[in-house]
Image (cartoon, helix red, strand yellow):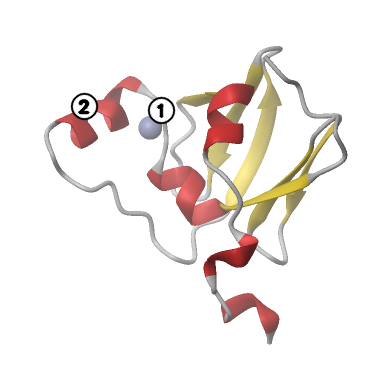
Amino acid sequence: MRTPDEIHNDAAARALTLRWPAGETQRVAHARLRAACPCAACRRIRLAGAALTAAPNITLAAIEPMGYGVQLAFSDGHARGIYPWSYLEALGHDEADGDARHTA
Ligand SMILES: [Zn+2]
């Protein structure tokens, strides 16, 4: 499993930035991280077929290192999700999603 060299919470852009050993930078929007929360409760919601939606203005409040990944706490008070590095990597890159909201 790959481990990022650097992880950074870009509060202004509402994105989590990960720098991988090969040098590439991955950005994942806070709202998408929240919607992809891997905790048991959120998993159950998704398994039931419901989309887990996050408020577009949600922000990442805290990053807790867990060795094999990070535990992320969000501004809605939800802090149960532990995101392994491989899971974060699989979320892909958000910058090219055509989201122009942060460019103003
Ligand atoms: Zn969750």
Image height check: is 50 above or below 31?
above
Q: Position of residue 64 (x, y in %)?
A: 68, 26
Q: Is residue 57 visible?
A: yes
Q: Is residue 67 left or right of residue 48?
A: right
Q: Amino acid at mark 2?
A: Arg
Which residue was labeled with disc 2? 44
Q: Is residue 12 left or right of residue 40?
A: right
Mark 2 CB within 8 Å of ligand 1: no
Closer to the camera in the image, 104 or 1: 1
Residue under the point 71% across and 12% down: 67
Distance between the Cα atoms at labels 2 and 1?
10 Å
| Residue 38 badge | 1
What element does badge 1 sit on?
A: loop
Q: Position of residue 94 (x, y in %)?
A: 58, 57
Figure quadrant of the N terminus: top right
Residue under the point 68% across and 87% down: 104
Q: Quadrant of residue 62?
A: top right
Image height check: is 60 above or below 22?
below
Q: Amino acid at mark 1?
A: Pro
